[in-house]
Amino acid sequence: RGEALLDAPPPSSSSSSARELRGAVSSSSPRRSSAAGPSSAKRKKSKNGPAEQSSKKARRPPPQVAPTEKVERRDPRFDALCGRLDRDVFRKRFDFLEVSDPETERKDRERAVVRAIRKEERDKVKSGKKPFYLKRAAIKQKILDDKFDHLKDTGKLNKFLKRKQRKNRTKGLLDQRVAGT
């Protein structure tokens, strides 16, 4: 340590403190440099323990990709450019996808009857008649009339009526048995 003091520059004034002298001595001492060993923050807690590692890892910069134009996808269900959805036109265009189902055919016939009734009323209103709205019972009666006309056209009316009679007969027998007990 004495040699280090000799190598240090002479104090410029007599008021230099002991701290400055110690700093000069420590900076020029032949101790291990901080680059040679671990820093005080990175020291092991015990000689057998693992060294501390920083949790801050250097991240790679994201790869540079050539910019492309974003393709705008439009859902025709919600896009005004595609127009309004007309269920009848849609059903006609994609009818080949549907498997023939008697239930859907029946519902389609019912819808057609209701559509025809409403169209007829609209035409009458245009000609000057006061608007008139059929009651549900009257609409059901017209649907039933259409059902019988369809059965008659396809030749299945007799079979349908026989089945109905059989069903009503068994219903009547059940009513008699219940009333007899």
Image (tube, helix red, strand yellow):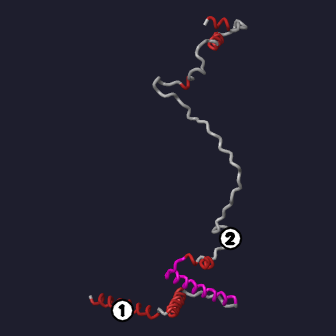
Q: Position of 4 compared to 50: left or right? A: right
Q: Could you tell me how far apart the alpha carbons at marks 2 and 1 are, in whole angstroms?
A: 56 Å
Q: What is the count of numbered marks? A: 2
Q: Say what secondary structure mark 2 lies in.
A: helix
The quarter of the picture where the N terminus appears is top right
Q: Position of residue 13 (x, y in %)?
A: 72, 7
Residue type at mark 1: give it.
Arg
Predominant SS along the magenta part: helix
User: Quarter-wise, where is residue 37 in the image?
Assistant: top right
Q: Secondary structure at mark 1?
A: helix
Residue located beneath label 1 in the image: 169
User: Residue type at mark 2?
Assistant: Cys
Q: Which residue is mark 2?
A: 82
Q: Position of residue 36 (x, y in %)?
A: 58, 20
Q: Which residues are magenta?
A: 98-126
Residue 106 image position (x, y, % from top left): 51, 84
Residue at 62 percent of width and 13 percent of height: 26
Q: Left of 98 or right of it: where is 25?
A: right
Please give left or right for residue 66 compared with residue 142 in the image. right
Q: Quadrant of residue 23?
A: top right
| Location of the C terminus (image quadrant) | bottom left
Would residue 28 appear left or right of 173 to someone viewing this image?
Answer: right
Q: Is residue 100 above or below residue 39?
A: below
Camera-near label (2 vs 1) is 2
